[in-house]
């Protein structure tokens, strides 16, 4: 893949053998596809994650071909009930160790985040990532703030996206209305993107990002002056 020109790899190198039992009492277990594959491999062979064991070799390949790494959160929570548990943060801390290793090879890294997290627990995800992953860029799928709204998860995740964006998340991975239900069509993609553009702007506004307030002021002025056609 590196020879073909791929720009970045997502690898689940933080799913360690000793972390897998931590998920046993979860409501929804391991929901990450890559994470579940690695967990099953570790248990079947009773060996440590080979991506973790050979991480320096992976970094050498990435450095040679200018490939960035997305360190996947294979133990992310798949439900509100499982948010911020021992397995999730154990893996996150390991991703921080791997980040420092990748940087030794001048390989760029971003950290994948959850997932399903209620509003009162969102800030801790950001503070833990900044502290233990050395301020490497964090990107999240939402997070979804409730599990009761299938078909409307662009809303439930847009709430979490705005919050974690405000707290310092670097990139938001959008969610469509089809999340958990099926594959999105064009309209689903459109609705997801609209929701996340609004969430991202709200976060920029809360952070005092240059230019964000200017857009709001321009819209407010046009609305006040009834300039509906502008």
Image: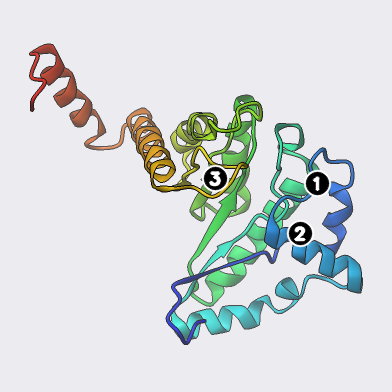
The residue located at (51%, 55%) in the rendering is 136
- Residue 199: x and y, percent? 40, 33
Nearer to me, 83 or 134:
83
Q: Are marks 1 and 2 in contact (CB under 8 Å)?
A: yes
Determine which of the numbered discs, if any, sits on residue 141 in the image: 3
CA gap, disc 1 to disc 3? Answer: 18 Å
Image coordinates of residue 168 in percent, x first then y, are 46, 40
Position of 132 with respect to 176 (left or right) is: right
User: Which of the two labelled residues, at mark 2 and mark 3, occupies the earlier sequence position?
Assistant: 2
Q: What label does residue 198 carry, if any?
A: none
As measured in the structure, the alpha-carbon distance from the residue carrying label 2 to the one carrying label 3 is 18 Å
Secondary element at image label 1 = loop
Q: Earlier in the sequence, mark 1 or mark 2?
A: 1
Task: Quickly name the residue at label 2.
Answer: 36
Label 3's element? Answer: strand
> Which residue carries the number 1 mark?
29
Identify which residue, 150 or 145, lies in the foreground.
Answer: 150
Q: Residue at x 71, y 79 (%)?
A: 54
Would residue 63 appear left or right of 213 to someone viewing this image? Answer: right
Q: Quadrant of the C terminus?
A: top left
Disc 1: CA contacts within 10 A as few (<14), some (14-19) or many (>=20) = some
- Residue at 65%, 59% (x, y): give it: 95
Looking at this view, is 121 or 38 the one in front?
A: 38
Classify residue 28 by image quadrant.
Answer: top right
The number of numbered badges drawn on the structure is 3
x, y percent for residue 148: 65, 26
Q: As displayed, is residue 188 above or below residue 207?
A: below
């Amino acid at each position: 893949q590196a020879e073909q020109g791929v720009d970045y790899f997502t690898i689940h190198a933080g799913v360690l053998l000793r972390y897998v039992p931590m998920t046993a009492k979860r409501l929804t277990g391991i929901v990450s596809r890559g994470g579940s594959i690695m967990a099953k491999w570790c248990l079947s062979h009773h060996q440590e994650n080979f991506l973790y064991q050979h991480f320096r070799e992976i970094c050498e390949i990435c450095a040679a071909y200018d490939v960035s790494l997305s360190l996947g959160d294979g133990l992310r929570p798949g439900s509100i009930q499982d948010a911020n548990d021992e397995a999730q943060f154990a893996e996150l801390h390991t991703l921080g160790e791997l980040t420092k290793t990748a940087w030794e090879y001048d390989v760029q890294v971003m950290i994948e985040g959850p997932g399903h997290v209620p509003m009162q627990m969102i800030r801790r995800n950001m503070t833990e990532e900044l502290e233990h992953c050395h301020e490497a860029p964090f990107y999240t799928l939402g997070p979804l703030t409730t599990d009761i709204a299938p078909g409307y998860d662009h809303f439930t995740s847009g709430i979490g996206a705005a919050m974690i964006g405000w707290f310092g998340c670097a990139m938001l991975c959008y969610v469509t209305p089809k999340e958990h239900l099926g594959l999105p069509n064009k309209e689903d993609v459109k609705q997801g993107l609209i929701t996340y553009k609004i969430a991202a702007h709200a976060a920029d506004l809360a952070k005092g990002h240059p230019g964000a307030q200017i857009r709001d002021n321009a819209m407010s002025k046009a609305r006040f002056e009834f300039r509906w056609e502008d």
